[in-house]
Amino acid sequence: MIGKLLGHTQIQTTARHAHLANNSVKAAARKISDFIADAITGP
């Protein structure tokens, strides 16, 4: 899905660059989980 959104025609192109974003993905997931936790339990 990410490759299609980026306009990649080959999965190898997406795979080559995917490892570069791991830290960003982890940070975003942490922010989202904190937001959900706050929504459930309160700030």
Image: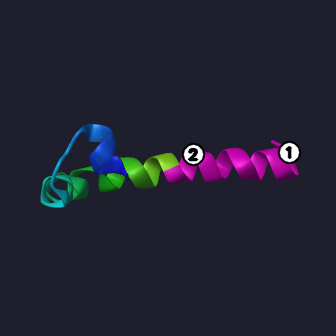
Could you tell me residue 20's position as x and y percent?
Answer: 21, 52
Residue 27 located left or right of residue 38:
left
- Check disc 2: other Cα within 10 Å, few if <14, some if 14-19, many if 20+: few
Q: CA distance from mark 1 to mark 2?
A: 15 Å
Picture layout, residue 15 above or below residue 8: below
Answer whether residue 35 is magenta in the image. yes
Query: Residue 22: image x %, image y %?
Result: 32, 56
Local packing at callout 1 (Cα closer than 10 Å; few below 14, some 14-19, many 20+) is: few
User: Which residues lie in the magenta part?
Assistant: 29-43
- Image check: 10 left or right of 41? left
Name the quadrant of the C terminus.
top right
Q: Nearer the viewer, residue 18 or 32?
A: 18
Mark 2 lies on residue? 31
Colour basis = rainbow
User: Of helix, strand and loop, which mostly describes the magenta segment?
Assistant: helix
Vertical position of residue 19 compared to residue 6: above or below:
below
Q: Residue at point 27% right, 39% down?
A: 6
Indicate the quadrant where residue 26 lies: bottom left
Query: Secondary structure beneath disc 2?
Result: helix
Which of the marked residues, 1 or 2, is nearer the chain's N terminus?
Answer: 2
> In the image, which disc is placed on residue 17?
none
